[in-house]
Amino acid sequence: MQLYNTLSAEERAELIELAGKNRLTLSFYAYSKIEDPKKFRDDLFLAWDALDALGRTYVAHEGINAQMSVPAENFEAFRETLQAYDFMKGIRLNVAVEQDDMSFLKLTVKVRHKIVADGLDDATFDVTNKGIHLKAQEFNDMLDDPDTIVVDFRNHYESEIGRFMGAITPDVDTFRESLPIINEQLQPHKEDKKLLMYCTGGIRCEKASAYFKHQGFKNVYQLEGGIIEYTRQVKAEGLESKFIGKNFVFDHRLGERITDDVIANCHQCGAPCDTHVNCANEGCHILFIQCDACAEKMHGCCSDRCTEIIQMPIEQQKELRRGEQKGNLIFKKGKSDALTFKKERNIFEEIKPVKVSAITEIRKKVQKERKTLVGKGEHYFTKASVAQFLIENASVTIGDQILIQGPTTGEERMTLTAMKVNGQEATTAVPGDKVTFEVPFRIRLSDKLFVVKNIA
């Protein structure tokens, strides 16, 4: 019985490209008492693997928390795998605002002590005794109530790029840090204020609402379905969005734009920007905000040292990071000495939102495109700066826009102006041919060759 992935992320990306099918990115959670999380995990993996579902899921005795990528054609079948369990009948699936077929490239279902780490060790705490759920319009109305205190239960790197105006946004790295901080700050308001809370999809503030009821707070409310469901309701009902900026997401997109407001700044130069990236140096990989100008200047790195490292041979880079454990340190961008502007930021009330239309976005693609995998790397001739590829899946022709992609190479685009096919000058290569052409960089055997075409 196979309960693990046999394909690498790169191989899975190839299959998704070749399939050419639309996928849906979605998330869901449910708190419930699960007697045997291990068996629950195994059953889910087998059912979802058969549907080509990908994503990251945690299960524990207290419930399930999942972020998934599912083929659109298998959406209802996927829903049925959840409905098979009583506690997930009628469960809300939060479908992402922006869709990306590559949001997840493998399926992981892991057993954890808790689905949301809270740092609590209190047997009397009942996580199912939650606060009152509010829909988007109800949430908007309560925000306007002067007796309301609204709290963002996400981490600092999430609230930095988007939030509800007037929200308390703790400068924390983890959810468990926020609970005692907010509890201490709001002690005087247990009886007289309405405590209104929100998070990305609802799972954190649902636990937080139960915690604050446990602590004696009388009027506890939460945004049903979090920012994701709020945004869906705002669009469907034509409501005013009181959330501004971007919603941080934990897949490779790192953010979904909700409004045109940019409330954050590049951590290197201070320009208005809300684009999160991971440092291009795999030995660092720190998460930070970087504008297009700094991305070009720093080659996607957070510091001069990291820029130097990525120019080194790959084996030397591996040796430098051997034994290093990054873990959650990649999210502690505020602790990096290299990112000086993060330390100089003013509090939120002093930031004036800038409309995204006023910012040059080099990364933003004007047109959608379709990549067709045509071959794989075979050899690189150092002296001549020539690459060789074996054509396997489709033809390639002089004049085609091509993309060479790999874990070390990254993405290199160029127009094919000349090539040799099986040693002879030619204009077209078909499956089975070996092609060679000049490139200004070194390819690896793991590199893949794509033909790129713009689509409407």
Image (cartoon, grey):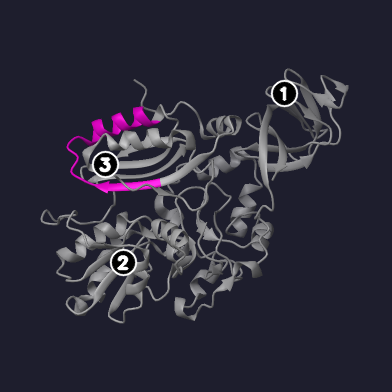
Q: What separation in Å lies between label 3 and label 2 (alpha carbons)?
A: 25 Å
Name the element at disc 1.
strand
| Depth order, front residue of 415/224 | 224
Q: Percent x, y for residue 316?
A: 60, 41
Above or below for 410 versus 238: above
- Which numbered disc, 1 or 3, marks the residue that appears first in the sequence? 3
- What residue is drawn where x is 55% and y is 40%? 318
For disc 2, the neighbor class at 10 Å (few under 14, some 14 to 19, many from 20) is many
Q: Percent x, y for residue 229?
A: 39, 56
Mark 1: amino acid: Ile
Identify the image quadrant of the N terminus: top left
Total numbered badges shown on the rendered structure: 3
- What residue is drawn where x is 56% and y is 53%? 279
Mark 1 vs mark 3: give the one in front: 3
Asked if the residue at tag 1 contacts the one at tag 2, i.e. Cβ–Cβ closer than 8 Å, the answer is no
The circle drawn on residue 391 is 1
Mark 3 vs mark 2: give the one in front: 3
- What residue is drawn where x is 48% and y is 37%? 72
In the image, the segment drawn in magenta is: 27-48
Q: Percent x, y for residue 414?
A: 77, 41
The circle drawn on residue 89 is 3
**Which residue bears the numbered disc 2?**
197
Judge from the rendering whether residue 37 lies leftward or rightward of residue 306; answer left or right: left
Judge from the rendering whether residue 245 lies leftward or rightward of residue 66; answer left or right: right
- Residue 31 is covered by the magenta coloring: yes
